[in-house]
């Protein structure tokens, strides 16, 4: 199984459990060809690896999507996505996020 296929298969196994197609975690996992331990952990409320590691990343998932969208637009317009330019754009996204948080914090009135 390819690593990129695993989240999709796990989500399908979970969806079938929720729908009642399968009543046992191992049956659903086996039917979708995904590790039983992964489906069991997620069925009991565990987070995916991507979700669990998001707090350790410099950019959130939404910020990453914004960066991917920007890179895609660069390519479609015929500009190469240079590594230095991508780094600068990621820093700008982080800077805007931190600025927005600070602005919101400063607008909170004292009690």
Image (tube, helix red, strand yellow):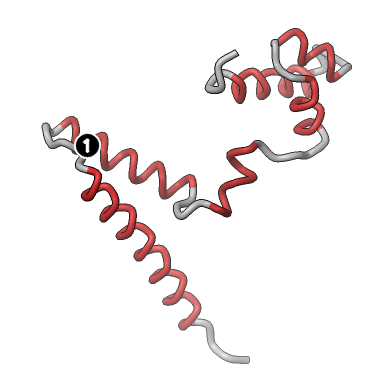
Q: Would you identify the image quadrant in which residue 67 lies?
A: top left
| Above or below: residue 27 compared with residue 39 | above
**1 left or right, relative to 90:** right
Q: Residue at x 31, y 39 (%)?
A: 69
Residue drawn 70% across and 16% down?
34
Q: Position of residue 68 (x, y in %)?
A: 34, 39
Residue 76 to residue 84: above or below: above
- Extreme-top residue of the structure: 31
Location of residue 90 with respect to 23 vertically, above or below: below
Residue for badge 1 = 73
Quadrant location, the C terminus: bottom right
For label 1, the crowd category at 10 Å Cα-Cα, with few meaning under 14, some 14 to 19 and many 20 or more, is few
Q: Quadrant of residue 96?
A: bottom left
Q: Out of 92 and 1, give the one closest to the viewer.
A: 1
Q: Position of residue 66 (x, y in %)?
A: 36, 45
Q: Relative to the observer, which residue lies in front, 81 or 100?
A: 81
Quick one: SS at disc 1?
helix
At x 55%, y 16%, the residue is: 2
* Residue at x-position 46% and y-position 70%: 101
Tally of marks: 1
The spot of residue 105 in percent (x, y) is: 50, 78
The quadrant in which the N terminus is found is top right
Which residue lies most toward the front here? 83
Q: Position of residue 26 (x, y in %)?
A: 84, 16
The residue positioned farthest toward the left in the image shown = 78
Please give left or right for residue 7 compared with residue 87 in the image.
right
Along the horizontal axis of the image, is 106 left or right of 82?
right
Left or right for 77, reference 57: left
Most distant residue in the bottom direction: 111
């Amino acid at each position: 199984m390819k690593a990129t296929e695993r989240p999709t298969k796990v989500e399908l196994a979970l969806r079938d459990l929720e729908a009642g197609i399968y009543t046992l975690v191992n049956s659903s996992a086996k039917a979708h060809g995904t590790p039983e331990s992964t489906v069991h952990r997620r069925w009991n409320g565990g987070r995916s690896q991507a979700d669990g590691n998001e707090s350790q990343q410099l950019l959130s998932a939404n910020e990453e999507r914004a960066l991917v969208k920007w890179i895609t637009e660069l390519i479609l317009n015929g500009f190469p996505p240079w590594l230095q330019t991508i780094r600068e754009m990621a820093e700008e996204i982080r800077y805007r996020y931190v600025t927005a948080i600070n602005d919101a914090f400063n607008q909170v009135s004292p009690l």
